[in-house]
Amino acid sequence: MKLHRRFAVSLLLCTASFLFAASPQPKVPRRLRVGLVLSGGGARGAAHIGVLKALEKLHIPIDAIVGTSGGALAGGLYASGMSPEEIQHLLISTNWDKMFQDAPNRNNLSWRRKQDNGKYLPNLELGLKDGKIMMPTGLSAGRKISFMLHRALLRNGGIRDFDHLPIPFRAVATDLTTGNMVVLSHGDLADALRASMSVPGAIAPFEFDGKLLVDGGLVRNLPVDVMRKEMHVDVVIAVNVAKGLFSKNRLNSALAVSQQMITIMLLKDEKTQLALLKKGDIYIKPELGDMAASDFAHVIQAIEPGNRAALSHRTGLQRLSIPEKQYALFLKHLRKAPLSHQIVDFVNVSDKSKLAPKVLLSRIKTKTGEPLSLTTLQRDLDRIYQIGAFESVSFEWVNVENRNGILIHTKGKPWGTQFLQGGLKLSDDLQGDSRFDILLSHTMTEVNSLGGEWKNEIQMGRTRRIRTEFFQPLDAAGKWAALPFMEYSSKILDMYEAPTGWQEYDVRMFSTGLLAGRQFGNWGAAMAGLTRKWGSTSPFSVFQDNNSLKRNDVNIAGYLFRFDYDQLDDPYFPIHGGAGYAHIFRSSRSMGADFSYEKLDVRFEKVLSFERNTFILTGEYGDSLGTDLPFYDNFRLGGIFHLSGFQPGRLNGDSKVFASTIYYRDLPIRAFGFKCYAGGSLEAGSTWANANSFNAGDLSYSGSLFIGSRTLIGAVYIGYGRTDDGSDLFFLTLGQIF
């Protein structure tokens, strides 16, 4: 009986299973594949972040992304697993003013490069090759942009096929040699974004897979066709942040006309791409007003308009939405956590320069077997860049045979090892005393495997000078160095002596010498050496009759010691840091000098800031150590911020004491994109025949009021100074410090 009962149950189950299997099953509708096309537009591309936020709010999964320029940046970061909030934080926390300056922050400059900082026109270096002058291919080589991208995309280290990213992705660039569109689908993602963002003239072209690439917006600013052809999606969401045409009344400058011409070219292709949109596709055009593509300082202002524009298409977008739980699983697959405590297994350098490998390796402080420190790595790249031989230095996080490590790439300058720089300075007291100087410099790097550097300078103006020097590191790390030099100078020296008044002297000097010493990281150096000088001094013009000063020959020989310290963050308007020096020189008859004398010169300054207010405290002391200084080498006071109410050189003597406090405030206005400052100074000091003659009652007191700003050609100061004895001086200065 039990056997029959089991057989009946089994037969019933089999029959039911057959019937259900034979019954037609309800079909689950396939989810439409959604592709997101993000246009270029520079800083306006921040609106894409707002669009991404809206799409996530509506639970719309993205299956593929294609972007150009700023759209490639936002799209590539999102495809890599970053959230819209993370992308927003990256863009608004980036100092875009410095992002397009390839030189490291001044605090991180090597000592050798700090000596040049503020001396030459900023961001202007001309190449010299085969006797021809070569211009840079962009205002920036994009070095800092490259580091920012590689840092942000570490989470995807090792992924070379963009189809294997959390969201398949394509970046669009332009082949500069052919003018053709290039679709980037593999390789290093950070490099692909860098190539797509290479705005001609602003950022240097980028070599990728043997092609020289620039901004993709030149040929396909809204790449709908790429999405259709390569990504095979059902629905396209196209977001266009490009700026429209200017109205007639705004075409009032050559720049505006040039921009209009470029926009017309872009709009022609834009119409072609919009025609490829089908029924069911969605076109989003955020209202960004007159926001410029270069206005990276205000990228946050573009995010909300992008969000509003996307949500205005809520009805059309909601049909692409999926349930909340299903979308949560999509985001879980999409999001990739940033790498933390990633162990560095190796550090390799890809370099084709003449430098010995140990020269580069000695500047790398990143340790194998330890967690990756991006701060340390950035300083490593800065130290290599400061050698002066490279256009850019970048890194790549790679996986080789299941070992994670860093591959550092160096790229030589297009013109090789020789380049030109220049500087200028102008001062005027607005009462007829104008002074103007021009400085030209030629530098040759990679002279030998240790990184020897040959520099030549010519200065013309009130001071005429020719100098050649050879900086030779004595070890691979560049801690020890020697500096032989030769120089000829002819300068006009103002002398004031009561009661005769002002005289101008032409001081001509030929000097040669050798210094050697040690550099202490990037903050200071101690050098000692020998020098020999020959020359003459003679009256240039006489404002008062004084026959006591006549032409003299000069013969100086001696030794010197100098210690220099500099941790200022800016040579013109610092907000933190300090600087100073202590120099000692002794001219000795035993070495062939006409007479012996000694000179001690000490200076320090400290910068203190809070909020937008800055104070610079300065102190100076000089003494002849009981000897008599020649008049052309004595201590001088007068001029801007050195007893500002006096003319330069109004006070001179064998001993000096000086102190000042300079205050300035960062104003809420900009001049051509640069910060403006207003401030004043209080100063006290004097000179004496010797230190024993010091008398506090002899001190002169002065103050000044000024406004100032950085410019494309250096710093400008306009102000007024007045001393306690009624002397006053208007001043205007512009240019570099040399």
Image: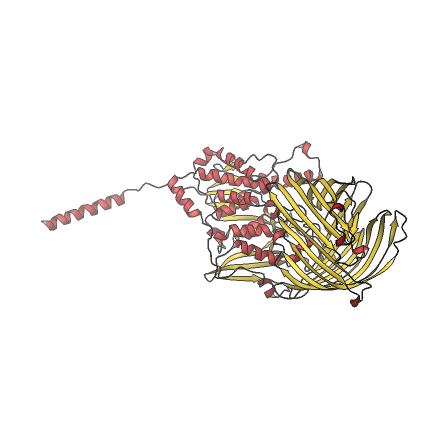
When asked about the image quadrant of residue 622, the answer is bottom right
Question: How far from the left and from the top, in percent, is residue 449?
Answer: 64, 66
Q: Is residue 690 visible?
A: yes
| Residue plotted at (66% across, 42% down) | 663
Q: Kindly give the residue lying farthest to the bottom in the view shown.
A: 590
Q: Is residue 200 visible?
A: no
Question: How far from the left and from the top, in percent, is residue 117?
Answer: 68, 52
- Depth order, front residue of 375/679: 679
Q: Is residue 299 left or right of residue 545?
A: left
How many numbered circles does the render carry? 0
| Residue plotted at (62% across, 45% down) | 608
Q: Kindly give the residue lying farthest to the top in the view shown.
A: 249
Q: Is residue 136 left or right of residue 380?
A: right
Residue 574, relative to residue 110: is it above or below?
A: above
- Depth order, front residue of 504/604: 604
- Depth order, front residue of 556/412: 556
Residue 7, relative to residue 288: is it above or below?
A: below
Question: How far from the left and from the top, in percent, is residue 139?
Answer: 66, 49
Question: How far from the left and from the top, in percent, is residue 422?
Answer: 73, 52
How is the model colour-coded? secondary structure
- Depth order, front residue of 631/214: 631
When asked about the image quadrant of residue 672, the answer is top right
